Amino acid sequence: MDTTLRITSARAGRAFVAEIEKVSGQKLLACYQCGKCSAGCPMAAHMDILPNQMIRMAQLGMRDQLLAAKSIWMCVSCLTCNSRCPKNIRIAEVIESLRLSVLRTAKRDDHLEIMELSPEARAVLPPIATISAMRKLTS
Amino acid sequence: MGNENKPMKLAYYPGCTLKNHAANFDVSTVSSMAKLDVEVEELERWNCCGTVHALGSDNVMNRVAPITNLVRVKEAQASEFMTGCAMCYNTLKRANIDVKSRADALETINNFLSLENTKYEGDVDVLHLLEYLRDRVGFDNLSKKVTKPLKGLRVACYYGCLLVRPKEVAFDNAENPMVMENLVRALGATPVDFSHKTECCGAYQTVDKPDVIADRTDKIVGSAQGERADLMVVSCPLCAFNLDFRQDDSKRLNPDFQNMPVLYFTQLMVLAFGCDEQALRFDLQHIDPLPALKARGLA
C-alpha cells in the first residue's frame, strides 16, 4: 500500500489514540517496529495492512485509514503476535479496540451477515464457529 | 486417582458443540475417563461460555456467560471443573482470571446475577482435560490402562491457539507444547514433530471465508503429511471442523493436497483403552479414519 506519513507535532487524531490506548489497555509508543508480530501472523497473507503497520498508524492517530482496513476484520485473536512481542504489547487487543471503534458507533457497521450465507453453507457450521464469528464481527 | 471401587468424581463442562457436531468428543471423553476411574459429572444448567474472550479492557458484559457457569460449579458443591474444548477452556479461564483482578467487574456481574442463590467470589478453578490427565492422573498411571497399544500409529498433535496462548492460561510451552505428544506416547503411538502445531487454523473466518481456511488447512495438514503422520489429533471443535471438513476446499486449492483424518485425542484413548466402539462416533468425522487405522492393524 502507498502511504505517505507526515510526522508533525499537531494533535490531530489524539482523541482516537487515547481511545485505542484506553480500550486496548496498551501503550502504543512502546512499539519499536521489530516486525515480529507480522512475521508470525497466520492471517498476514490475507491482510491489506500488516499488524506492525497497524500499530504505527495507531500511534499516529490515522483513524480513517485504520477503520477502513480489511485487516482489522481478518485478525482472529490467535495471540501469536502478543506472545512473541519483545515489548509485551498486546497487539490483538489493539486490533480488537479498532474493531470496537467501528462496532460501537451508532451505525453498528456489522462485518458478518449470517443470513446472506446459503442455507447449505449455514447448515454445516458448528455453533462454535457462528457464535465466535458473531461475537467478534457484529455489534 | 481413585481405586476400582470408588471412582473419583470430576465436574465436567462439555460446551455447546460437544452436544451436536462434536458429540464424538463428548462421548469419548466420558467413556475414556471412566476407564481411568474418573466419573465425569456434567454440570446442571450450564450455558454457552461465549466461545471467545472479549479483549476490550472495559468489557464486563461478555464475562457474564462464563461466570454463570462458574456459579453452576459452586452449586454442584465443587471447587474445580474440567472441560476438553480448547475454546471453552480459554474463555472460562480468562474470564475467571479477569474477575479475580477486577473487583468492580465481579460486583457488576454478581449484581446482574442477583436472582441466583450463589454469589461468585473467584473461588472456582478451571482445568483442561489434558492438564488433568498429565497432573492428576499421570501418564505413567494412564499407560497402565492401555489394553490395545496404538503401535506404529504416527500422530500429529495439533494445539492451535487457545491451549497455549496467552501465557496466563497456558499449561504448557507456547512455542513447543508437548503434553499431547506425551499422552499419545503413553497410549503406545508415535508422535511426529511438525512445524505447524501451534499455527492458527483461521478459527471463525470459516463462517464466511472458507477460502482462507482452505489455505490454512492446506498448510497445517500439509506440514503433518510431510512428517508422514497417519492422522492428526486436536482438542478444539472449531479446529476439528476447519482441519477436517474444509479439506475438500484445500484439495480444490491445491491438487497435491492429501487427506488426513482429524480425531479428538480422547478418541485415541477410547481405542487404546478398549472402550465400547460406540464411544468413537466416527460417523461424525468427515475424513474416515478407518483406512489409516486399518493400515496399522488397529481397526
Image (tube, grey):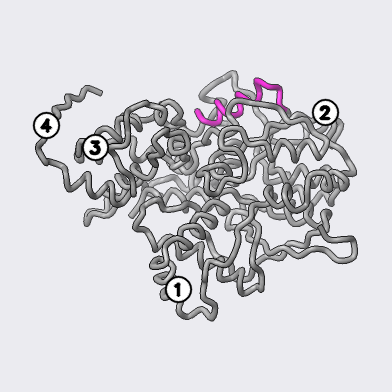
Q: Which amino acid does label 1 sit on?
A: Asn
| Sequence-wise first label, 1 or 2 | 1
Residue B132 on image: x %, y %: 70, 52
Judged left or right of residue B221, residue A139 is left
CA separation, marks 3 and 4?
A: 12 Å
Q: Nearer the viewer, residue B262 or B96?
A: B96
Which residue lies under the disc numbered 2? B152
CA separation, marks 1 and 3?
A: 37 Å
Q: Same chain for the residues at labels 1 and 2, yes or no?
A: yes
Q: Can residue B227 be seen here?
A: yes
Judged left or right of residue B139, residue A36 is left
Which residue lies under the disc numbered 1? B110
State the extent of the magenta-drawn residues as a range. B215-229
Q: Which of marks 1 and 4 is in front?
A: 4
Q: Which amino acid does label 2 sit on?
A: Gly
Label 4 CA crowd tier, 10 Å (few <14, some 14–19, many 20+): few
Q: In which quarter of the image is residue B196?
A: top right
